[in-house]
Image: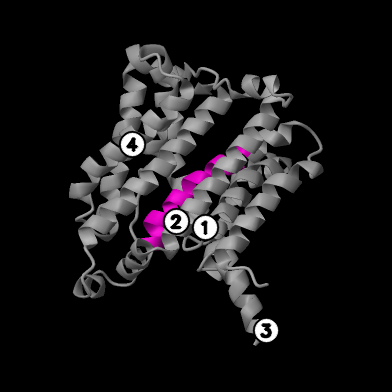
Amino acid sequence: MRLTPKAATLLVLALLVALTPFFFPSGYYYRVGALLFVNGIAVTGIVILTGYAGQISLGHAGFSGIGAYACALAPTHLGLHPALAIVLGAALSAVLAYLVGRPILRLKGYYLGVATLGFGILVSMVLNNERDLTNGPDGIDVPDLGLRALLETWGLDLTNGQFWYFFCGLSLILGAWLALNLYDSPTGRALRALHGSEVAARTVGVDVARLKLQAFVISAVYASVAGSLLALQNKFITPDVAGFMHSIEMVTMAVLGGVGSVLGAILGAGILTLLPQVLTVFAEYEQMVLGLVMVLVMIFLREGLLPSIFKAIRGKGE
C-alpha cells in the first residue's frame, strides 16, 4: 500500500523520534534533539505563513519571546501551572498577532517584512527594559513543568534530557499533523491559491485579507509554543529568545530545507541546529563555514534542500 505524503511525513518524524536515541553516544544529545524539535515546531509555523500563504515575517521571534516569558512569569504572578502558562502564551500571541496583523498584512513584499521586523524588535526591547518584571538582559528563572515527576509515579524513570526529548518530539509530531491537515483542507487550498496570485485568488472568491490574518495568527501560535518549550526545558530564559537573529534563524531554517514542505523545513531546522555542534572543530572559522554551506544551498538548491532532492530523484526516474 502506497503511503500518502502526509502519512509518509508523520511516519518519518515518528521513526526519527523513536529510533535516533539508539545512536546517541551520551545523554547530552537528548538536549540537542529536544532543541531540534523545538526549532522544528517554530519553522512549521513559518511554513504555514510563508510556504502556504506566501507572506514574510522577520519578527516571529517576538512571539517566541511572549511564549517563553509567559511560562516564566505566569506561574509566579498569576499562580498558573506552567502547562497552563503555555496555553496563556499561545492565546496572548494569537491576540497580538490578530491586532498587529490586521494593519500590517495590508502591506506587501519588503514593507511587510520591515513591519514584522519592527514588531519583533519592540517585543525584544520591552523584555530587555522592563527589569522589574523580566529582570532585563540578565534573564529569569522558569518554574519546572512537573510532568517528569508525574511520570515517575507511573514507573517511567526518565532523565531530564530524555523527558524533554520525547515531550518535544511528540509535540513536533502533533504540530506537523495539524499543519499537514491544514494543507489538505479547503482553507489550505485557498492559502496556496493566495500564494500563487492574490488577484487570481480574490477573483474566485477567496477572502484574501482574512486568510492572510489566519495564517499569521496560526504561525504566531506555533512560535509561541516553541518559545514556551524552550524556556521550560532550559529552566531559564533571556530576551535573546525574542531577538532579531532568532527571527532570521527561523526563516533561514525553513528556506534552507524547503519552505513549502513541512518535512523539508524540519530538515532545515535540524541542519542549522546540528551544524554548530559539528563545526566546533573549525573553532574560529565555524561561522564562516556555516555561512558558506547556506550560500551554496541557496545558489544550487533554490527550492530548498528536500524539494530539490525529490526533484532530482524524480528526474532520474523519468
Assign a secondary structure to mark 4.
helix
Camera sees residue 277: yes
How far is mark 4 from mark 2, CA to CA? 18 Å
The region drawn magenta spans 34-53
Report the disc number at residue 47: 2
Q: Residue at x 33, y 58 (%)?
A: 55
Residue 171 is situated, as x and y percent measured from the top left of the image, at: 55, 41
Assign a secondary structure to mark 2.
helix
Query: Callout 2: 10 Å neighbours few (<14), some, many (20+)?
Result: many
Mark sitting earlier along the chain (4/2): 2
Which amino acid does the dot numbered 4 rest on?
Ser
Q: Residue at x 31, y 26 (%)?
A: 126
Which amino acid does the dot numbered 1 rest on?
Val
Q: Is residue 43 left or right of residue 15?
A: left
Which residue is identified by label 1?
262
The quadrant where residue 99 appears: top left
Which residue is identified by label 4?
93
Q: Residue at x 53, y 64 (%)?
A: 304
Mark sitting earlier along the chain (3/1): 1
How far is mark 2 from mark 3, CA to CA? 28 Å
Residue 6 is situated, as x and y percent measured from the top left of the image, at: 55, 62
Q: Quadrant of the N terminus?
A: bottom right
